[in-house]
Image (tube, helix red, strand yellow):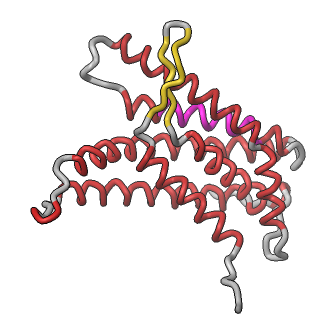
Amino acid sequence: MKFIKINKFDLIIALYIFGLITVNLMGVKLMPLGHFLGLDFNISVVIFLMLLMFTTIDVVSEIYGRARARSIVFSGMIVLVLLVLFMALATWLPQTSHFALGSSYQEIFGISIRLAIASIVSFLCSELLDVLVYNRLREKMKGRKIWLRNGLANFAGTLVDTTLFMVISFYSVFVQGFGANVKFLLGMILPYWLAKCVMAIVGTPLVYAGIRYLRRPKTAKMIPVEEEVYEN
């Protein structure tokens, strides 16, 4: 019996798209972390998938270069736009009376549309920043210290991602006063970003593992820093 052969790069991209879609569909659920310094700390359940997405982009940058990583980011943005459009269509179409879902379908996926819009903005800005920082550091460090480049790129990318995503997704026009919104958002942004930073540090071995995984085939040779071609 022959096993199905899966291209390694295809698997990496599939995992990336899995994380991208799941973050948008399930990111609305928040977990309480407690109360500290007058703030109620909350965190989204999809925190566990953010490491996968940024790690994937850094691994692709290391092996295939900046242009390929940017191509994946823009492809991911197209996926998010299509997701938003289809959710809008799906919630607008009428439903049969034989299997009525009530308002739950619209409530769940109506919220997800807002999250997806927030994710398009935060995803594009943060992922492109991650690619930029990682590759600039790769040039300066001559391809050395992957752990440091990965950490700094993730810290910068996740800060932008977290701030933009939380503000667009959870800023409430029904809350009395701008200060109340800021207090609530800081209670999510700070722990969420710090948790991402911790996970980026803990997950550094995954970057090395991913690089070794993609390097094995002869066709997946790492691009030297001095030979990398940048697109305008």
Seen in the picture, residue 151 relative to 33 is either above or below; the reply is below
Position in image of residue 16 (x %, y %): 59, 58
Quadrant location, the C terminus: bottom right
The residue at 38%/34% (across/down) is 169
Q: Quadrant of residue 216?
A: bottom right
Please check the rendered image and state whether residue 158 is part of the magenta-colored stretch, yes or no.
yes
Q: Quadrant of residue 101?
A: bottom left
Please check the rendered image and state whether residue 94 is part of the magenta-colored stretch, yes or no.
no
Region in magenta: 150-164
Name the foreground residue: 137 vs 161: 161
Q: Is residue 177 rendered to the left or right of residue 115? A: left
Position in image of residue 172 (x %, y %): 31, 25
Name the foreground residue: 102 vs 231: 102
Position in image of residue 65 (x %, y %): 73, 58
Quadrant location, the N terminus: bottom right
Q: Quadrant of residue 159?
A: top right
